[in-house]
Image (cartoon, grey):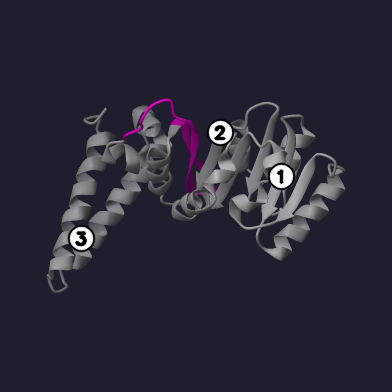
């Protein structure tokens, strides 16, 4: 992977960045995504934010190699602190982290999101945390996508400012309202695997002391399995 040839995962993330956006890529690593977007005329300007010195230096070097220093700013900063009001950022990308970490980054400095029209978020796990944050903070799910790359499954959740109060059912929080409506093959594969894993956990619990905590955990897993299977079988659509 490089700035000219992104991974399939990052290509799909890039797909959701609006044309002519001023984009901030938080946790940019080598700045491949900003370089791809700006270098191909898909975004006007970009901020590449990195909290770790090594990747920050790699990002600066990549931007210099691509000759994009005039349109991509690389900043060493934690989370949304990489964004300054004068940047005029209209889209924010946070990709390749856990859902709870992405949600905590958004929550930590959400005042920096003023003027932002779109959040493109790609959690590696636990996308539910992002949907919960969205509902609590006035962001609606504009689009969702689920993809498989190198035998790993990833979700992309695209948020835009909501015009009304957002509420999700528990099924929508866990599985994603748009993803569960589409029920693609990749979606079904992911949740069949998850349900099978939960069943294995329940089976392993049978040989342990049935404390209140264990019993409650089993009940929770049984409920989630039922919820997922209803969606997979089209009973919750």
Nearest the viewer among 222 and 197 is 222
Going from N to C along the chain, the mark reached first, 3 or 1, is 1
Crowd rating for badge 3 (residues with CA inside 10 Å; few <14, some 14–19, many 20+): some
**Left or right, 8 with reference to 190:** right
Do tag 2 and tag 3 residues touch (Cβ < 8 Å)? no
Q: Residue at x 67, y 41 (%)?
A: 85
Do tag 3 and tag 1 residues touch (Cβ < 8 Å)? no
Q: Residue at x 31, y 36 (%)?
A: 168
Q: Main secondary structure of the magenta part?
A: strand
How far apart marks 3 and 1 lie (CA) works out to 43 Å
Going from N to C along the chain, the mark reached first, 2 or 3, is 2
The residue where tag 1 is placed is: 47
Q: Residue at x 52, y 46 (%)?
A: 110
**Left or right, 51 with reference to 222:** right
Residue 141 lies in quadrant: top left
Q: Secondary structure at mark 3?
A: helix
Nearest the viewer among 61 and 163 is 163
The residue where tag 2 is placed is: 118
Residue 221 lies in quadrant: bottom left
Crowd rating for badge 2 (residues with CA inside 10 Å; few <14, some 14–19, many 20+): many
| Residue 120, image x, y percentages | 55, 38
How far apart marks 2 and 1 lie (CA) works out to 15 Å
**Left or right, 173 with reference to 78:** left
Q: Tell me the magenta residue range.
A: 141-167
Q: Residue at x 27, y 55 (%)?
A: 198
How far apart marks 2 and 3 lie (CA) works out to 36 Å
The residue where tag 3 is placed is: 217
Do tag 2 and tag 1 residues touch (Cβ < 8 Å)? no
Which residue reaches farthest bottom? 209
């Amino acid at each position: 992977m490089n700035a000219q040839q992104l991974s399939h995962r990052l290509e799909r993330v890039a797909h959701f960045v609006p044309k002519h956006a001023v984009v901030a890529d938080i946790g940019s690593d080598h700045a491949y995504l900003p370089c791809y977007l700006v270098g191909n005329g898909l975004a006007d300007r970009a901020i590449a934010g990195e909290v770790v010195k090594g990747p920050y230096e790699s990002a600066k070097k990549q931007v210099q190699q691509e000759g994009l220093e005039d349109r991509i700013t690389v900043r060493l900063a934690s989370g949304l602190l990489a964004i300054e009001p004068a940047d005029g950022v209209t889209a924010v990308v946070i990709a390749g982290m856990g859902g709870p970490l992405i949600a905590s980054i958004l929550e930590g400095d959400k005042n920096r999101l003023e003027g932002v029209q779109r959040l493109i978020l790609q959690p590696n796990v636990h996308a539910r945390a992002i949907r919960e944050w969205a509902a609590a903070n006035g962001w609606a799910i504009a689009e969702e996508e689920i993809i498989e790359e190198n035998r790993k499954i990833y979700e992309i959740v695209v948020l835009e400012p909501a015009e009304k109060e957002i509420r999700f059912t528990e099924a929508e929080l866990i599985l994603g309202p748009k993803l569960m409506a589409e029920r693609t093959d990749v979606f079904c594969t992911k949740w069949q695997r998850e349900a099978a894993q939960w069943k294995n956990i329940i089976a392993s619990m049978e040989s342990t002391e049935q404390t209140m905590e264990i019993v409650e955990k089993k009940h929770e897993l049984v409920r989630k399995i039922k919820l997922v299977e209803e969606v997979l079988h089209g009973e919750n659509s």
